[in-house]
Amino acid sequence: MYLAIPKEDINNESRVAATPGTVKELISAGLDVYVETEAGSKSYISDKEYKEAGANIIGSGNEILSQADIIIKVLPPSVEQVSQIKPNAIVISLCQTTIELDIVKAMRDRSLTSLSMHLVPRTTLAQKMDALSSQANIAGYKAVLMAASKLSVYMPLLMTAAGTIRPAKVLILGAGVAGLQAIATAKRLGAHVEAFDVRPVVKEQVESLGAKFIEVDSSGDEGVGEGGYAKETSDDYKQRQQQLIHEHISKADVVITTALIPGKTRTHTYTHFYG
């Protein structure tokens, strides 16, 4: 069976769907693996490393899509790419099936089978396949580093002969996988960290990382959805939420937003911007 690993065609996308180590495992499972040339270049993986792992290197993206029985990608194929994939093929990617509807429709019309890594449940049995949590973890870590590099003040408290410099104030909105990693990273850099989440149950996790948990007074299950994920809150809650965040965001040096409701576009919890 022909398994293809195409090059990600989004300019700022540096990830690749499989490493040489993964390629070896796929070949051991009986698959013929074909990798588009330079697919791993932005991840510092050369074509030579893929060849040494047993993969075949293909120069044309169109060729690799049109012949593959299985295609694995980080991001889903574009509508144009879908038209090049042979019917009845299987596409495995981080496709957001409730948001990227044009791509889902194109794959349906092409008679493709799409396996979305976004929909892998966060359970013990599925942990090894939980790509969403692994990428969210990286995003939370990287967000803090990017903020620190752009910040005009120090992150940690500094006490010098010339005086004392207060630590930067960081506000994290959302305490899921990305938010908790952002909290931990900001604390390691010495910042004063506050975090908000609609789920009161995460307060203990936030405080265990050394951050202050800010919350809206409400019934205990206001923002708690199925499986421990966040859910849509009432209009009254949202109004009080905006007032609370308004108070804290105006004092923050850094605001990192990670709040997300599964199956929906990014949530907006405030409408004012501060210069």
Image (cartoon, rainbow, N blue to C red):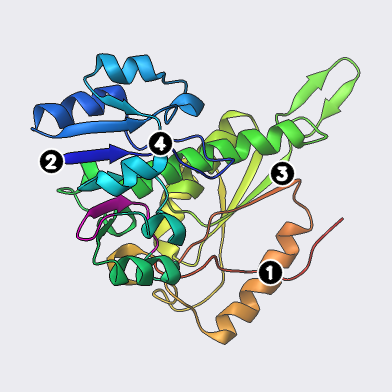
Q: Which residue is mark 1?
A: 270
Res 226 quadrant in image: bottom left
Q: Which residue is mark 4?
A: 60
Q: Which residue is mark 3?
A: 169
Which class describes the residues within 10 Å of circle 2: few (<14), some (14-19), or many (20+)?
A: few
Q: Amino acid at mark 2?
A: Met
**Residue 210, visible in the rendered structure:** no
Q: Secondary structure at mark 2?
A: loop
Cα–Cα span, label 1 and label 4: 46 Å
Q: Amino acid at mark 1?
A: Tyr
Q: Amino acid at mark 4?
A: Ser
Q: Main secondary structure of the magenta part?
A: loop
Q: Is residue 102 left or right of residue 190?
A: left
Cα–Cα span, label 3 and label 4: 49 Å
Q: Amino acid at mark 3?
A: Lys
The earlier-in-sequence mark between 2 and 4 is 2
Which quarter of the figure is the C terminus placed in? Answer: bottom right
Closest to the camera, between mark 1 and mark 2, is: 2
Span colored in magenta = 86-96
Q: Looking at the picture, how far across and down is residue 56, in whole percent?
A: 26, 25
Closest to the camera, between mark 1 and mark 4, is: 4
The earlier-in-sequence mark between 3 and 2 is 2
Q: Which residue is mark 2?
A: 1
Look at 56% across and 68% down and name the residue there. Answer: 267
